[in-house]
Amino acid sequence: MGINEKLILVTNDDSVNAKGIQSLVKIASKSGRVVVVAPDKPQSGMGHAITINDPIRMNRVEMFGEVEAYSTTGTPVDCVKLAIYEILGQKPDLVLSGINHGENSSTNVLYSGTMSAAIEGAMEGLPSIGFSLANYAHDADFMQYEAYISTIIEHALEAGIPKHTCFNVNIPNVKNAAIQGIKFCTQAHAFWADRFDRRLDQFGRPYFWLTGEFGEVNPKEDSDLHALVNGYISIVPTHFDLTNYTAFEQYKSMKL
């Protein structure tokens, strides 16, 4: 690696075989030396899970050409930890996660393995970005957004990201030509109205599929959901401090 060459860690939650990570590696490789450490199977919805009851196994893989790459049996967060402390022997200049099949806007960030990997990078004090595309199709075209993704990566490398903060980047499911631009946004207040689809197996035993509808409470024009609906790529500066500071001020002098 050259003296000034940036070291970029790339991971995801859709597995090392996913089309989204292949696209992200191609794009990121133009900005520095990329090392891939990603799960060997899909880990969507894992949130910030870590593996503590089973060993984590890791194998070198050759699917990214000359790019150094490893698959692991661990979660996305495990991958970031393994990369920093076992593979790289140093902290990278940038952590990238994605590109996820499906958006991770609003409160989806709490469930997302993609974003948890980026948040783990932020916890390590590293500039980190999670990329998601609001398209679940197996043939989704990630590369059409290359210019926008490169712009965001270059900004993070050159200007940095506030410490212990990561970018949650969501791309709307529209053609590249229809993208209206990039907007910094707040996280929308939205949630899943959960319900379970109850079915019976061949033995008459019930099983359940989680389903439901996602909706915004108190819609705001500066939210990530509003940006996506209007054709903008949204960026939410995200951190892991879940303290409600308004409530803290209310309660800090209270004696119970």
Image: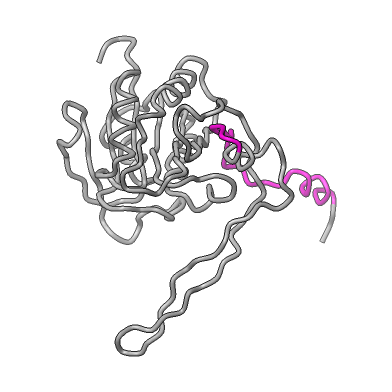
Residue pictured at 48% horizontal, 74% vertical? 197
The C terminus: image quadrant: bottom right
- Between 245 and 96, the one lying in front of the other is 96
Q: Is residue 13 magenta?
A: no
Give the residue at the far top of this rendering. 3
Up-down: is 143 above or below 15?
above
Residue 131 location, quadrant: top left
Range shown magenta = 230-253
Spot occupied by residue 241 in the image (x, y as percentages of width and height): 61, 42
Q: Is residue 79 toward the left or the right of residue 113 in the image?
A: left
Up-down: is 201 above or below 241?
below
- Between 146 and 6, the one lying in front of the other is 146
Q: Is residue 244 magenta?
A: yes
Q: Is residue 161 toward the left or the right of residue 88 in the image?
A: right
Residue pictured at 46% horizontal, 24% vertical? 148
Spot occupied by residue 224 in the image (x, y as percentages of width and height): 61, 39
Spot occupied by residue 91 in the image (x, y as percentages of width and height): 37, 28
- Between 64 and 19, the one lying in front of the other is 19
Residue pictured at 45% horizontal, 37% vertical? 130
